[in-house]
Image (spheres, rainbow, N blue to C red):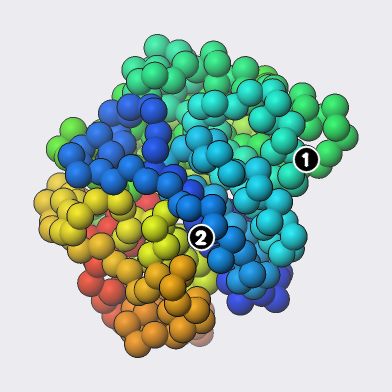
Amino acid sequence: MGMLDKLFKQQDPRPFSIWQIELTTRCPLRCTMCIKDEYRDWQRKEMDFENFKKVVPFLKDVQSVVLEGWGESLLYRHLVECLLLIKQQGAKAGFVTSGMGLTEEYAKDLISAGIDFMGFSLSGATGRTHNAIRVNSDLDALIHSITMMKRLVAEKGAARPAIHIVYLMLKENIDEVPSLIDLAGTIGIRQVVLINIVHIANKRQDQERVFTCEETSNEPYQAIFTEARRRAQRYGLDLVIPSMRPCDVAVCAENPLKNLYVSADGEVSPCVYLGPPIRSPFRRIFCGKEYSTERVGFGNIFQEDPGDIWESKGYSRFRERFLLRKKRFDENFRALLETRRIELTPLPEPPEPCRTCHKMLGV
């Protein structure tokens, strides 16, 4: 189950759980772990607002809309208008942000528009660590933005947005996770989501990943997580920790059976990691080995009906691989419960573009 699926796990009759819509690929921050700083052909673009309006009627079939992709959503000048249009369709809406450009007036507009969830992205619990990883970002300013947002929500007497912290774990900052919990608890945050680096584009990034690709009983960061859980319990804080070693997952956390991604130029992909704004093929490192990967798109939502794209032969075949995996996984689970057999039947291979994605490791 993905992060936002966990945030909104109540039953909903709509056919789609999440549509992730990329409004812009622009971001003034430099991050040592960001893929845009690795690719010279990074395409800086924004979704035309008139094109966004073409998508709006279809959002009545979507439970949650995540207005983010490879850029900073707060830089999109029609963001508030987008939120208002989404809310008119009955879907939840929000995004994860670096906080760049969030003024008090802007925050009030977001709250008035009905934003449901807002994640703030940190890369350290100290200014020294965070600011070194996210160049042009300042942790103190980011914390000020978070507390400002919480204050404005309280003053308005609103229940939303639900504010959480997203923390990218790296070898250079994982030891600060317990301190992160103290920071979050002190400022009144009730959920912290720890994430692994997924899209790896160079050796430096691969060396910084904290999860392992090998089956092992060794858990080098167990003491850190144990202490983080202890502190989270003290603050009454929900702490989400991903797996740190590979595990069999039938469907990855991006859940292409219920979710999809729309790029700034309207291309529909199963997930954000298969549609980066760079030319195909692009370089991707998977478990220490370099691969050449093609972008995956099944149609343009500005030019075609989303239903036709979803039911197209190529897209249907893509999802069929995950349906087969889910069926086999369920069969194995039933056999395990009924017979206690340990020898389980291997799952079918996922779609080819997903075989070199760390999401398929369950991390």
Name the residue that disc number 2 marks. 51
Name the residue that disc number 1 marks. 112
Q: Nearer the viewer, mark 2 or mark 1?
A: 2
Residue 50 placement (x, y as % from top left): 54, 57
Per the image, label 2 sits on a secondary structure element best described as helix
Sequence-wise, the earlier of marks 2 and 1 is 2
Give the residue drawn at x 62%, y 64%: 56
Residue 343 placement (x, y as % from top left): 31, 78
Circle 1: residue type = Ser
Per the image, label 1 sits on a secondary structure element best described as helix
Q: Is residue 264 or residue 330 the one in the foreground? A: 264
Q: Quadrant of the rendered structure where residue 312 is? A: bottom left
Residue 155 placement (x, y as % from top left): 85, 27
Give the residue drawn at x 62%, y 40%: 118
Residue at the far front in the pictured view: 50
Residue 261 placement (x, y as % from top left): 45, 62
Give the residue drawn at x 78%, y 40%: 112
* Up/down of 280 relative to 323, above or below: above
